[in-house]
Image (cartoon, rainbow, N blue to C red):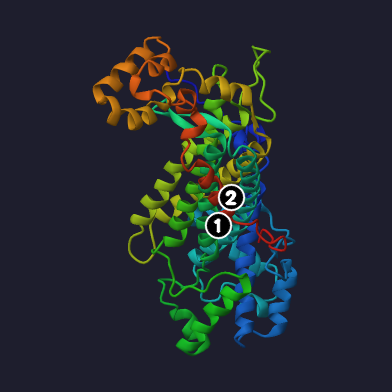
Amino acid sequence: MPSPTPPPDTPDDFGPIDVGLLSPVTVGHDARVSDAAVLDALVTAEVALTRAYARVGAAPESAVTEVASTFGWQDGQSGCRGHDLALGDLVAASVAGGNPVIPLVSALKSRVSPSAAVWIHRGATSQDILDTALVLVARAAAAEVLASLAAASGALAHLARAHRDEVAAARTLTQHAVPTTVGARVAGWLRGVDRARARLDDARAALPAQLGGAAGTAAAFAEHLGSDAGATALIDAYSAELGLAAPAAPWHTERWPITELGDALVQAIDAAGKIAADAATLSRTEIGEIAEGAGGGSSAMPQKQNPAASVLIRSAALRAPQLGATLHLAAALAADERPDGAWHAEWPTLRDLLRLALGAAATAARLAGGLRVDAGAVADNLAATGGLLVSERLSIILTPLVGATRVREIVAAAARGDDLAALLRALPELDGTDVADLLDPAAYTGLAGTFVDRSVAAASPAPDAAEDAR
C-alpha cells in the first residue's frame, strides 16, 4: 500500500522559513540582510546604472529622472526604498531563470515609459546587478558590525585598565600554569577585537561595484557608448554613484571581494568567540571569576544564571568558519567567465555569515560592557595550589643554588601536600631570603602590566559618528 502524500508546505501554512527561532544569536539583527534589503539593493544597483549613463553624457536627464523618481532613489547612497515592488512576485518569478534579476528587469521596465526603459539594465548582465547589490548589503551590514566591535573594544579597554594589576592564575591545557593578571587576559581579548576591526574595515573599504556585461569584457557598454573610453568612464561613474570602489576589471569569476570579506567576518566572529569561550569557562560555578552582567535562566533549575550571551556567541563562532570555507569553495569552482552554480552558492552563504557577524558582534558588545570580575574568587583560585603557581620562578632561582633534582623534589613534595614555604625556609641556601616575596604571585607577572598598557593605547578609536551604515 503506497504511503500517503504529505500536504505541500506553503507560506500560508507555516509562515516565513526563518525568523530566528533556532538562531537566537541573530534575533534583532536580520533587517540589514533581509530579502527586502536585498531587493532594495537590487533596485538601487539598476537605478544607479541609469544614473551612470547620465553622468557620462549618454542618457537624457528626463529618462534618468523618471527612473530615479519611480523607484525611490535617494541621494547620498542611501539607496531605493520606495520602489513598491512586490517581493513575493519577484521570488516566485526568479526560479525560472535562476536569479532574481531577470524578472526584476522586466518589472522595472514595465513601470516606466519606453524612452526611459531603454536605459534600464542597458548592456549589463544579471551578475553585474546581483553582485553589486550583495556588496551594497554587505557594506551596510559590515558598518553595523564595526560599530558593535568598536563598542566591545571600548568596554574591554576600560575593563583591562580597571584590572591591570589584579593577579590571577593563568591556565594552560586547562591547568594552573603561572600568574597573570585579569587585565592581561582582557587585553588579549581587546587585541583580537581590534585586529578584526581593522581587517573588516579594510575589506569593507575595498568592496567594488560589478559591471562587466555578458562575459566580463564590457563590450556592450563600449558599443552603446561608441568607445572603450566611454565604457571605462561608465564603470567609474557607476561605482561613484554607489560609493563603491571602482574595479580594475570585472570580477565575475575572480571572487576575492567575497572571500576577503568573508575571511574578515569570520575573524570578527572568532574574536568574539574567544571572549565568549573564556567568559563561559571563567563563569563556571567552581571557578566563578567572571559573571555576565545579566545571566540567562533555566527552565528547570531556578538557581542558575547561565552565561547566555557567551553561549550565543559561541554558537555563531562554531558556524562561521564553515561558511567562510564555503565561500572559498565556491570561489575556487567559479569556472569559465561566468560560474555555473558556484556563484549561486555564495548568496545565502554570505548572507548567513553577515547575519552571524551582526548578531555575534552586537552580543559581544553587550557581554563586554556587562562583565563583572569577582576579586574574591580570583584570589581564592590564585591561592588554590599553595604557591605552586610560581614553580617556574622557583626553578629559575633555585636551580643554580641547589640543582634541578632538588628543585623537582621540593615541588613534588609540595604537590603531595607539604608546606612549600616551610620547605623553602629549610634550605640553608635561602638563609636570609624573603620566602614570602619569593612565593608572591604578584612578583611574577612579568610584562603583564606593560602589555595591558600597550594594548589599551593601541586600541582603535571608535569610528566617526558621522559615518553611517551605508
Q: Count every numbered label the image shows and give the total.
A: 2
Q: Do residues under tags 1 and 2 come within 8 Å of each other at their CB atoms? A: no
Assign a secondary structure to mark 2: helix
Q: State the mark number for residue 100.
A: 1
The residue where tag 2 is placed is 456
Q: Nearer the viewer, residue 267 or 240?
A: 267
Distance CA(mark 1)–CA(mark 2): 47 Å
Q: Nearer the viewer, residue 118 or 207?
A: 207
Q: Nearer the viewer, residue 408 or 456?
A: 408
Q: Identify which amino acid the numbered label 1 is placed on.
A: Pro
Q: State the mark number for residue 65.
A: none
Asked whether, in this view, residue 266 is left or right of residue 92, the answer is: left
Q: Identify which amino acid the numbered label 2 is placed on.
A: Val
Which residue is pictured at 46% across the width and 61% down the height? Answer: 257
- Residue 355, compared with residue 74, is above or below; it is above
Q: Residues within 10 Å of mark 2 (few under 14, many from 20)?
A: many
- Residue 13, compared with residue 81, is above or below; it is above
Which residue is pictured at 51% across the width and 20% down the height? Answer: 383
Assign a secondary structure to mark 1: loop
The answer, for residue 439, to whether it is visible in the render is: yes
Q: Residue 381 placed where, x, y %?
A: 53, 21
Q: Residue 441 placed where, x, y %?
A: 49, 29
- Residue 347, compared with residue 385, is above or below; it is below
The answer, for residue 341, to whether it is visible in the render is: no
Q: Residue 271 placed where, x, y %?
A: 51, 43
Considering the image in quadrants, where does the N terminus appear?
A: top left
Q: Residue 108 placed where, x, y %?
A: 65, 66
| Rendered image quadrant of residue 305 | top right
User: Looking at the image, which residue sits at the far front?
Assistant: 432
Q: Residues within 10 Å of mark 1 (few under 14, many from 20)?
A: many
Considering the image in quadrants, where does the C terminus appear?
A: bottom right
Earlier sequence position, callout 1 versus callout 2:
1
